[in-house]
Amino acid sequence: MIFTTHKFPDHYLSEYSCRCDDQLTLIGDHSGLTRLLGYSADELTNTYQNSFLALVAPNAKKMLQIALSETDEIECVIPVYHKNGHVLWLLNKAVRVTDHHNCICVHGVLVDITKLKHEYDREKNTTHVWEEEAKKDSLTHIYNAYYTRKLAEAYIQETNNTAALLIIDLDDFKQINDSHGHLFGDAVLVQTAQIIKKLFRSEDIVGRIGGEEFMVLMKGTTDMNILHNRCQKLNEALNSMFGDNIPVCNPSCSIGIALFPQHADSYFELFSNADRALYFAKANGKRQYALYNKHNHQMNTRNYSLRSADYDEKTLRGYIDIDEPR
């Protein structure tokens, strides 16, 4: 009994039948297989002892053996070595039967779908690239506001996680645009994104959540010594962004910080409290950070207090300003 194959376009495939014993040793006429793989009958016999399994790529051998041990009918795609060293991808449709001599045999059809597999992989890779690009801010290529929020929400919802959320706002960015032009302003945003990404760890969530606003969720971090160090280094790096080349442009930032779970029970509340801290940092001199304090609804002794009571939470950047992509 031989399974029929799926019907692929003729230019995609070649089709060969073969017969093996229960150890997948080829028996009978396997000239079609030798033509497919580029071997002569003598090479297949002398070099590989007519073992079909010996031609299969190592990572697929066990899968094929397990499949045959668990069922009498299989259909799977396996990588097989051609004589020239290239891998051919074969759709293997086979059935295990007992012949009239009471011997177990495996009858199968091998369909060369290498071209189809390569086209599928290219399409899959292209799709993956587009999916990754959809997560990124088009200018800075760090996460966009929507995806930054989704990642941060997912992390906050996990049990026993701790984190520090930093909202970073470039000071007087409008003046940079007005003085040097919007193209230069875009360059400042790109450089800022790279500085932030380099300064924080790869596991931290880094995104651009507004025009000149960025966000970092530092996973597992609530140590104020670490946070103070990062905030200080960030402003130092921004201030020297252009060195002496453009001395009239020395960017700085204000930062609002809220800790999870000390300051919030949800991402929305955490973001809101960090944003309140940011407001006070900017209102009290800029180029500094503010830490939210939920116990007395005031900032800690480094200068800081809450945003005014009429703050409209519907404008939270990165939270509900961007609809989910369709």
Image: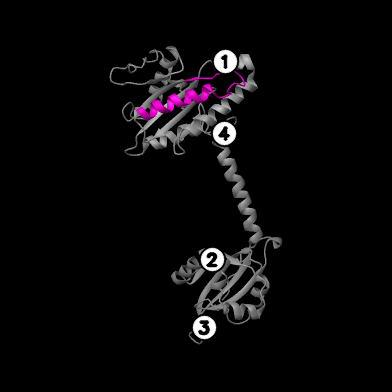
Q: Nearer the viewer, mark 2 or mark 1?
A: 1
Q: Which residue carries the number 3 mark?
A: 99
Between 84 and 116, the one lying in front of the other is 84
Determine if the magenta segment contains residue 250. yes
The amino acid beneath tag 4 is His
Contact, mark 3 vs mark 1 (Cβ under 8 Å): no
Placement of the N terminus among the 4 image quadrants = bottom right
Question: Crowding near pointer 1: few (<14 within 10 Å), some, many (20+)?
Answer: some
Disc nearer the start of the sequence (4/2) = 2
Q: Which residue carries the number 4 mark?
A: 141
Where residue 279 appears, as percent x and y from the top left, is 43, 16
Q: Which residue carries the number 1 mark?
A: 174
Q: Nearer the viewer, mark 3 or mark 1?
A: 1
The amino acid beneath tag 1 is Lys
Among all residues in the image, which is located at the extreme front? 244
**Secondary structure of the residue carrying numbered label 4:** loop
Q: Nearer the viewer, mark 4 or mark 2?
A: 4
Question: Crowding near pointer 3: few (<14 within 10 Å), some, many (20+)?
Answer: few
The amino acid beneath tag 3 is Asp
The answer to whether residue 164 is left or right of residue 63 is: left
Distance, label 2 to label 1, CA atoms, is: 63 Å
The amino acid beneath tag 2 is Glu
Return the mark for residue 75. Answer: 2
Among all residues in the image, which is located at the extreme bottom? 101
Q: Nearer the viewer, mark 3 or mark 4?
A: 4
